[in-house]
Amino acid sequence: MIYTSTSCLKNPSNIITVLNEYEKADIENVELGSVHKYFEIKELKKYNFNFLIHNYFPPPKIPFNFNLASSNNEIRSKSYDLAIEAIDLCAEIESPLYTFHAGFTVDPPKLGEAFPKENITDRKKAISTFIEEVIKIVDHGTSRGIKTAMEPNVVQKFNLINNKNELSLFAEFPEIDELFQSLNETKLGLLLDLGHTIVTSHWLNFDKDEFVEKCRNKVFAIHASNNNGFQDQHKSLTKECWQSSKLRKFKDVPITLETMNLTVEGIKENIKLVKEIVS
């Protein structure tokens, strides 16, 4: 099934405006995303979409940086509570899946600001913290009948330190593999972002096709958008781009289009393109 993220439309901060536009355009499959202002959740009930929920949703009244690996107890606790709230909302609106971002070794001073490159938490400690939180989140999802999946981080030039990835967890397969080995029977999956993959593989110098194949049997869902191979730009897909070439492999899991700043017409063109690719 092909989903459209609520972040796709231009100026998407007011989610009700976005959902009204999608409803008028007969867009039925919607991923509730991470870019919206606080609103009354009960308003979702008036819509008849097939929903998925992703990461920083439902948006809290007081914004914060979502990081399940944070060494800051308050940030980590708020992140965990939001994930639990998201899973409960999934159960309420019949969303089968909640997906969340991999953690970070440091927190930005404020939401939306750049990650600092100092006072970085020891990587092993950050991973251990993340795993502790994720086990509880996945267990809660299982108890509510909701699947959960982690989205590997994207690594770009601006968040490298001396050409090394010190800030973002689970961007490369060996670390992802270690995560799943640590979780044993815990039923976590992957949200594989193909736009992230092509960018991260460039800056960390690994084979993007090999990465996809290694992740393949763990994938619960896909994010798809286009870029120049160096930045996570969330552009429209084309028939020729690398991301599109991988979509048929995942035609049996939800594919969410995560392009941004499009008109409704542009969104529908992307949906049509992906339907042609995976059919």
Image (cartoon, rainbow, N blue to C red):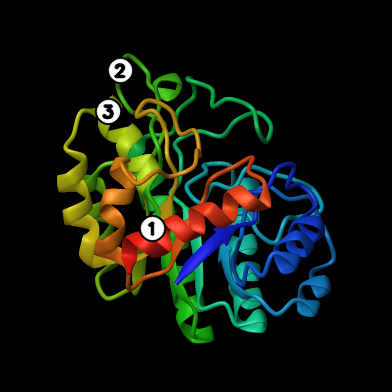
Q: Say whether marks 1 and 2 touch (CB < 8 Å).
A: no
Q: Name the residue at 22% across, 51% down.
A: 212
Q: Name the residue at 58% across, 65% down.
A: 53
- Whether 26 is drawn above or below 168: the answer is below
Is residue 181 shown to the viewer in this render? no
- Mark 1 or mark 2, which has the lower sequence index? 1
Q: Nearer the viewer, mark 1 or mark 2?
A: 2
| Secondary structure type for disc 1 | helix
Q: Give the percent coordinates (x, y) of residue 257.
A: 50, 54
Is residue 208 shown to the viewer in this render? yes
Q: Say whether marks 1 and 3 touch (CB < 8 Å).
A: no
Residue 131: mark in rendering: 1
Q: Residues within 10 Å of mark 2 (few under 14, many from 20)?
A: few
| Secondary structure type for disc 3 | helix
Whole-angstrom CA distance, mark 1 to mark 3, is 27 Å
- Mark 2 or mark 3, which has the lower sequence index? 2
Q: Nearer the viewer, mark 2 or mark 3?
A: 3
Whole-angstrom CA distance, mark 1 to mark 2, is 26 Å
Which residue is the site of mark 3?
202
110 sits to left or right of 5: right
In the rendered image, the quadrant that contains the N terminus is bottom left
Which residue is the site of mark 2?
163
- Label 1 is placed on what type of residue? Ile
In the rendered image, the quadrant that contains the C terminus is bottom left
| Secondary structure type for disc 2 | loop
- Label 2 is placed on what type of residue? Asn
- Label 3 is placed on what type of residue? His
Q: Give the percent coordinates (x, y) of residue 244.
A: 33, 50
